[in-house]
Image (cartoon, helix red, strand yellow):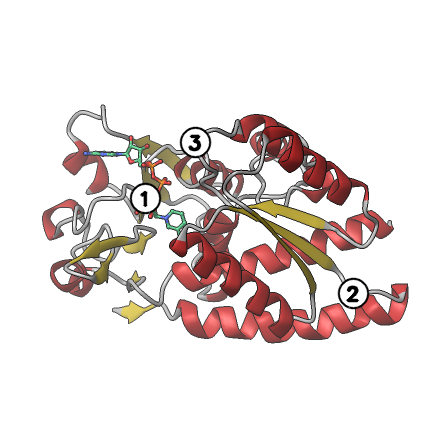
Amino acid sequence: MTCIDGKRIAADIRAELREKSAEFEKKYGKKPGLAVVLVGEDPASQVYVRNKVKGCEEAGIRSFAHYLPASASQKEVEALVSDLAADENVHGILVQLPLPAHLDAERILACIPACKDVDGFSAENIGRLAMHEEGTVACTPLGVMELLRRYQIDPCGKRAVVIGRSNIVGRPMALLLLNADATVTVCHSRTKDLKSICREADILVAAIGKPHFVTADMVKEGAVVIDVGINRVDGKLAGDVDFDAVASKTSYITPVPGGVGPMTIAMLLTNTLACAERAMR
Ligand code: NAD
């Protein structure tokens, strides 16, 4: 069994990005730029935004952090995002979710043009992914593919099972695996006989949001198990996979923390550079 080291890979990616960002700056006279918009004072969101800004610094990407009070109006947030959309120094825009309840998140996200949608959440980018065309892909599932690639795990011809069908993880994950020529099954809360489907998986991805949901009897001997879940149990982080019981059955497994988690910001920075490069074409 190999424990996949997402922390190390994410650090490698940041170092690689630093070099690529320096090349970009040499060529175009400016750094790739990422704007992050935070509305309100949610402590978890503040930590996420701080980590994203720090990640930018480490990767040689210019960050533009915008903090609006929780009382900001729909019009104010939309105006800010529209200004960022028109700013040539901003190549990517990220609006930290969740937004305060009085705001219409969908309408705010719609102000981000697809070419600056570094989260890959727009209908255009999801459509491109579904059609296997170039575009921006959601950071967490993209991070999973990058882990597989760097550990030379080729999904081609493999049976892949994704548990979860959310727009930000499960659904794009399934499309990415399909685009990589895996035979993909998507499971969700209405799936019948989940255990026997999971037992067929050569690659099993858990994106459920329930601690220790995937147990040893759901995993085939030698499978690759990717745990996207981030849950809090007694103040500690726990994945969706019962790691201690499952690990010895697997060929590769991601731990929580230190597996998929660190890859999300690394992919956000990767997407920012890709958007910047496309803007210069
Ligand atoms: P979500 O709640 O939007 O989706 C959960 C999915 O799990 C749903 O599609 C649902 O159908 C499925 N599900 C729920 N109960 C099930 C059951 N009993 N059997 C089968 N399927 C079931 O969650 P999400 O946003 O996709 O996130 C999933 C997990 O990944 C969460 O723990 C979240 O914190 C984590 N996450 C991690 C990262 C990261 O950076 N590593 C990023 C995003 C989300």
Q: Nearer the viewer, residue 218 or 67?
A: 67
* Residue contact between numbered discs 2 and 3, judged by CB atoms under 8 Å: no
Q: CA distance from mark 1 to mark 3?
A: 25 Å
Q: In the figure, residue 119 lies in which quadrant?
A: top right
Kind of element beneath mark 3: loop
Using a 10 Å C-alpha cutoff, classify the residue at mark 2 as few (fewer than 14 neighbours), some (14 to 19) or many (20 or more).
many
Query: Mark number for residue 101?
Result: 3
Residue drawn at 38 percent across, 45 percent down: 158
Residue 198 in percent (x, y) is at: 22, 40
The kind of residue tagged 3 is Ala
Residue at numbered disc 2? 31
Q: CA distance from mark 1 to mark 2?
A: 34 Å
Q: Is residue 222 left or right of residue 13?
A: left
Could one spot residue 91 in this view of the protein? Answer: yes
Residue at numbered disc 1? 207
Residue 172 in percent (x, y) is at: 48, 38
Residue 225 in percent (x, y) is at: 29, 54
Residue drawn at 22 percent across, 23 percent down: 190
Q: Nearer the viewer, residue 20 or 57?
A: 57
The kind of residue tagged 2 is Lys
Q: CA distance from mark 2 to mark 3?
A: 35 Å
Label 1 residue near ligand 1, CB within 8 Å: yes
Q: Quadrant of the N terminus?
A: bottom left
The kind of residue tagged 1 is Ala
Q: Is residue 84 left or right of residue 264?
A: right
